Amino acid sequence: MNLEITDRVVRFEQLEEKFGITIEALYARYEVVDDSPDGLRIARIFFDAVATNGELKETVKVRASAYNENHQLVGTGKEVLWKDRFPGFKSCEILVMNLPEPPTLVRLVPVLD
């Protein structure tokens, strides 16, 4: 089973601006890879990371945090945009693994940690 969840993804544009990137072409889906009781269920978040000034000043991680209907954090994933290896544009995929159900909210946040 595949379920599109793009409408559940929230970007933090002020942080994107602060770290010199924009997130474009966003698409997300929830997948049941194995429907057994302990089967694999994941969220895949696809996007293009584009440097606003052509290059990054620092290495940036884009973190995806998935939440359930009770607003509890149920999983995370990340993509690292290495300053020295970032050509100004990168197509990315973040996996959030082992989700018990489709997330009701996914936060996509650039961070420096």
Image: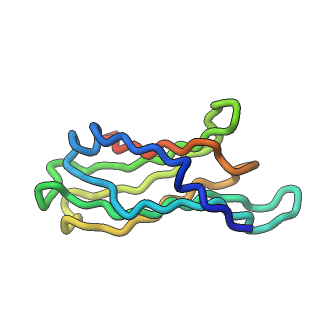
Numbered disc total: 0
Residue projecting furthest to the right: 37
Q: Please tell me whether residue 31 is drawn above or below residue 110 in the rendered image.
A: below
Residue 89 point in image, percent of width and height: 25, 67
Q: Quadrant of the C terminus?
A: top left
Residue projecting furthest to the left: 53
Residue 95 point in image, percent of width and height: 55, 59
Q: Residue at x 65, y 32 (%)?
A: 72
Q: Residue at x 61, y 61 (%)?
A: 4
Residue 81 point in image, percent of width and height: 30, 57
Q: Please tell me whether residue 102 is drawn above or below residue 109 in the rendered image.
A: below
Residue projecting furthest to the front: 7
> Looking at this view, is 40 or 2 the one in front?
2
Q: Residue at x 19, y 65 (%)?
A: 88
Q: Please tell me whether residue 81 is drawn above or below residue 58 in the rendered image.
A: below
Q: Residue 23's quadrant in the figure?
A: bottom left
Q: Residue at x 58, y 42 (%)?
A: 105
Q: Is residue 52 left or right of residue 2?
A: left
Q: Is residue 72 left or right of residue 15?
A: right
Q: Residue 38's quadrant in the figure?
A: bottom right
Q: Quadrant of the N terminus?
A: bottom right
How is the structure coloured here?
rainbow
